[in-house]
């Protein structure tokens, strides 16, 4: 197994000039860096992972810089050691950007699945090979724009849409009511995400109305750490309540929120919570509590595909999150993930993650690049 030892790691912080979006009133257009890690074994097998860093005003290099001091301890490890590697990174004394640990873990899983000749979702359990998706909007300019967006997505085959919006209840709720009125009876599932920007009073008022409108869920009404506020919402509204899934990440934290009945479903992202290794544990923890994990995957194709493999490996997830319009999220990938005419996304056919990277495009837009060798 000496050929599977990691002997080289290369990091690319990619800042492509794609269309930029925003998700709240007063938010500037967001720069989305794609942090790509490529691990290479002594035998030449490559594992790849990507995570998005989304920031205002400029591209964020933080996850790439964190990997400078993480990767020397990965050199010499084997993909068969990924549990040990994850535990070692989890207990490093210095706080780290969580995407860095996630990238290492996902790239190791990619190698392990390639070495086994299996798509990653099959190596993880293979519960299914397709899943329904929902179209995830950027902020749009008007109620009519949201109605038009939903109509276009429905024509394409989508069965569900999640709104990113102004995050101002005086604007958000009338938009939800207008879209609901237009699509009532068409079996289009609707969800609302307000990016942790409401206070408890606004969240209660909007949440109660969303329950009357039979929305699929109400996402991120409060900051993730306001567990008591989430408990209050869940007790006093009928709409399913889920968190943002960006800060309440560790297994012990998630177990606490489940035990306190703060959420209707868990929400995490493999590229933020530490990788495939911990998200597998989260899926099992939620399943034991009779709960779904509505995995998020807003980001470039490599972010989407890591989370897609998890959703296909387990049954307790309802939808794949499909950012749309597509093009801005597909930069740097030769293979992409798109929803079919029946509303499903399908497993990539190849071993590992099953996504081929367009390395020429990646290098063209790279703003930070370095290599670590054994």
Image (tube, rainbow, N blue to C red):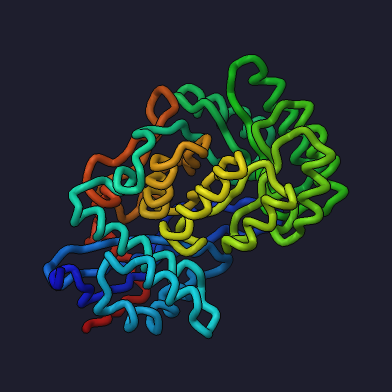
Q: Name the quadrant containing residue 204.
A: top right
Q: Work out whether residue 32 can be spotted.
A: no
Residue extending farthest to the right is 201
> What residue is at 82 percent from the left and 35 percent from the top?
208
Task: Tell me if I can see residue 308 in this picture.
Answer: yes
Q: Depth check: give the residue in front, 340 or 80.
A: 80
Left or right of 260 in this view: 190: left
All told, the count of numbered labels is 0
**Quadrant, the C terminus:** bottom left
| 216 up-or-down from 94: above or below | above
Where residue 299 appears, x then y in whole percent?
46, 53
372 or 19, nearer to the observer:
372
The spot of residue 53 in percent (x, y) is 49, 64
Q: Quadrant of residue 276?
A: bottom left
Q: Where residue 206 sits: x, y (%)?
A: 80, 39
Furthest residue to the top? 185
Q: Quadrant of the N terminus?
A: bottom left
Q: Residue at x 46, y 56 (%)?
A: 270
Left or right side of 39 for 277: right
Expressed as whole percent of the image width and height from the top left, the position of residue 312 reads 39, 40
Q: Residue at x 37, y 46 (%)?
A: 309
Q: Is residue 290 left or right of residue 347?
A: right
**Image side of residue 159 versus residue 85, left or right:** right
Q: Where on the picture, by quarter, is residue 104?
A: bottom left
Furthest-front residue in view? 288
Residue at the image point whose x is 71% and y is 21% from the top: 181
Q: Is residue 95 above or below residue 358?
A: below
């Amino acid at each position: 197994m000496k050929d599977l030892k990691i002997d080289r790691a290369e990091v690319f912080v990619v800042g492509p000039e794609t269309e930029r979006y925003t998700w709240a009133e007063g938010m500037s257009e967001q720069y989305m860096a794609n942090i790509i890690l490529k691990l290479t074994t002594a035998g030449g097998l490559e594992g790849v992972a990507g995570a998005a860093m989304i920031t205002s005003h400029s591209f964020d290099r933080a996850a790439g810089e964190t990997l400078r001091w993480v990767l020397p301890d990965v050199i010499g490890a084997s993909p068969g050691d990924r549990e040990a590697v994850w535990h070692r990174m989890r207990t490093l004394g210095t706080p780290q950007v969580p995407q860095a640990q996630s990238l290492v873990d996902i790239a190791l899983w990619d190698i392990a699945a390639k070495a086994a000749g299996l798509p990653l979702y099959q190596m993880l359990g293979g519960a299914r090979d397709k899943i329904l998706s929902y179209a995830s909007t950027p902020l749009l300019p008007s109620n009519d724009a949201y109605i038009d967006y939903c109509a276009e997505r429905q024509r394409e085959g989508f069965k569900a849409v999640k709104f990113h919006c102004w995050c101002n209840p005086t604007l958000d709720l009338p938009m939800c009511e207008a879209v609901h009125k237009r699509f009532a009876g068409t079996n289009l599932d609707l969800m609302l995400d307000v990016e942790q920007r409401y206070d408890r009073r606004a969240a209660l008022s909007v949440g109660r109305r969303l329950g009357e409108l039979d929305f699929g869920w109400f996402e991120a009404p409060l900051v993730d750490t306001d567990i008591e506020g989430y408990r209050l919402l869940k007790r006093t509204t009928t709409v399913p309540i889920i968190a943002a899934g960006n800060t309440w990440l560790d297994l012990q934290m998630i177990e606490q929120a489940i035990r306190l009945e703060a959420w209707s479903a868990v929400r995490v992202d493999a590229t933020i919570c530490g990788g495939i290794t911990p998200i597998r544990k989260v899926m099992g923890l939620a399943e034991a509590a009779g709960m779904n994990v509505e995995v998020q995957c807003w980001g470039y194709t490599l972010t989407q595909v890591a989370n897609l493999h998890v959703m296909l490996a387990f049954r307790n997830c309802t939808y794949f999150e499909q950012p749309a319009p597509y093009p801005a999220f597909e930069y740097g990938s030769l293979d992409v993930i798109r929803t079919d005419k029946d509303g499903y996304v399908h497993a990539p056919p190849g071993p590992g993650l099953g996504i081929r990277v367009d390395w020429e495009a990646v290098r063209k837009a790279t703003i930070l690049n370095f290599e670590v060798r054994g």
